[in-house]
Image (tube, helix red, strand yellow):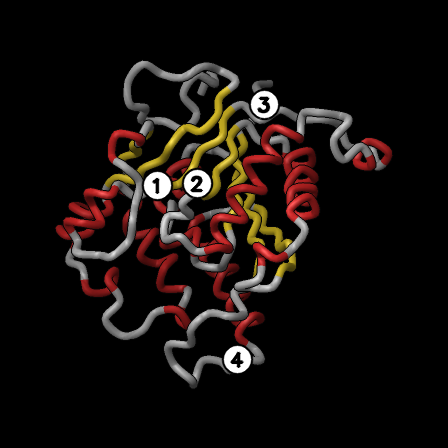
Amino acid sequence: MKEALTLLAVFAHPDDESFGPAATLAKYVAQGVRITLICATRGEAGEISDPSLTTPETLGRVREEELRCACRVIGIQGLRFLGYRDGQLSGYDPQEVEGKVVRAIREVKPQVVLTFGPDGISGHLDHIATGKATTDAFFSAGDEERFSEHMAEGLSPHEAEKLYYVAVPRSRFRAMSLDLPGTCDDRITTVIDVVPFLEVKKRAVACHKTQLPPGNIFAQMSDEEMRRWWGKEHFVLAASRTGFPSEVETDLFWGLGK
């Protein structure tokens, strides 16, 4: 029997998956890909859009439930939290964070790993730290001498085939008059058409009520605007053990026999 394809996504906060590549994740779920999400924090330091929803003391628990809601909407089968404090991720021992992601890679055995790039899309330090730890883990997980204590626990090295960074083209942010750096357009390697899954994305975003003040961009957009601005999701192929395509990809699993 052909082994099922698996994707591991590693992000910093609840809602990163929904404002980010939710439609792409939903598309692969529909194709039978098993997806596991790692969230490094519970978003305890986030904003509270409506004081009736939570308090600063309970925000982390509420945002965890919001993320579980989004995972159900998207179809994400596995959810893990690393347990780090929101806003403080860059202050933790990076090798410790890397080790936790290595463990997940060795347990889940994904072909594709998805995370933030060095710019963290928005420059958020938690995003940057998460992306760095995951990038390091992508290369470490296949080396039995790295985090060798895992071997004593019955785990084995695993080399994922491809590492992707979530990206938003700089030109899109500029066209939308958003003051965010984005990714240089010529660095984009992979573009996924997700128009059929935009409704899933909107419903996943809607789960994160504490982070959605009235007038959030998704709620305001018409279906036409959603297709125009978010009908394609973009990625950078950062590392590949199966080679790099000569043209822009349209599939994260290109070259893997999907």
Classify 10 Å Cα crowding around label 4: few (below 14), some (14-19), many (20 and above): few
Numbered label tally: 4
**In the figure, 98 relative to 223: above or below?**
above
Residue topped by disc 2: 117
Determine the CA span between mark 2 and mark 3.
29 Å
Residue topped by disc 3: 3
Element at label 4: loop
Q: Is disc 2 in contact with disc 3, using a CB cutoff of under 8 Å?
A: no
Q: Quadrant of residue 91?
A: bottom right
The answer, for residue 257, to whether it is visible in the render is yes
What number is the disc on residue 181?
none
The disc labelled 1 sits on which kind of residue?
Ala
Q: Is disc 1 in contact with disc 2, using a CB cutoff of under 8 Å?
A: yes
In front: mark 3 or mark 4? 4
* N-term mark: 4 or 2: 4
The disc labelled 2 sits on which kind of residue?
Gly
* N-term mark: 3 or 4: 3
Q: Quadrant of residue 244?
A: top left
Residue 45 in the image: x percent, y percent? 51, 70
Determine the CA span between mark 3 and mark 4.
44 Å
Q: Is disc 4 in contact with disc 2, using a CB cutoff of under 8 Å?
A: no
Element at label 3: loop
The disc labelled 4 sits on which kind of residue?
Pro
What number is the disc on residue 167?
1
Residue topped by disc 4: 56
Residue beneath the point at 34% across and 51% down: 200
**In the figure, 34 relative to 91: above or below?**
above
Determine the CA span between mark 3 and mark 1.
29 Å
Classify 10 Å Cα crowding around label 1: few (below 14), some (14-19), many (20 and above): many
* N-term mark: 3 or 1: 3
